[in-house]
Image: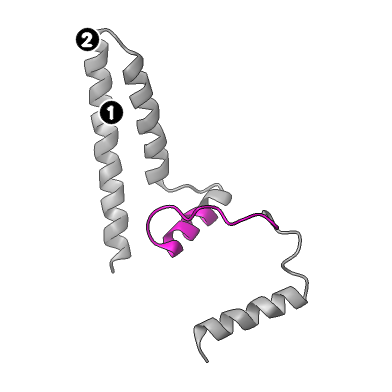
Amino acid sequence: MRFKDLAERQILKAKAEGQLTGLKGEGKPLPHAGYGDAAETAGFRIMADAGALPREFTLKQERDAQAKHLASLTDPEARKAAMAVLADLEMRLAIEQDARRKFLQR
């Protein structure tokens, strides 16, 4: 039996048992899948719902906050220090992204 048939059978069974009613987001369109693999996106969504965001996401948030902070600075010395922090965050983010890609290629 093909996977699609098995999945369809499980969906119909859950629907008949009433397990698909009252779920979060019921009746609403699915959120935009974003970039990358659909399974990866779904995994990230599940982890986010459980409150377990990957380090990559928190680094993106820190990087965005640092970029806003840098844009607000006018003092050259403060800008230089803020740029160093931003560069460090971008490097750590790139390392996390590369590690995830290598892990998923196995």
Does 2 lie within the magenta span? no
Question: Residue at left 39%, top 54%?
Answer: 35
Residue 102 on image: x %, y %: 26, 60
Residue that label 1 marks: 86
Q: Is residue 93 above or below residue 83?
A: below
Residue that label 2 marks: 76
Mark 1–mark 2 distance (CA, rounded to whole Å)? 15 Å
Residue 28 on image: x %, y %: 66, 54
The furthest residue to the bottom: 1
Residue 15 on image: x %, y %: 73, 74
What amino acid type is highlighted by mark number 2? Pro
Total tally of numbered discs in the picture: 2
The range drawn in magenta is 26-46
Does 33 lie within the magenta span? yes
Tell me the SS state at disc 1: helix
Q: Is residue 27 left or right of residue 57?
A: right
Residue 52 numbered mark, or none: none
Residue 103 seen in this snapshot: yes
Do the residues under discs 1 and 2 have CB atoms within 8 angstroms? no
Residue 25 on image: x %, y %: 67, 54
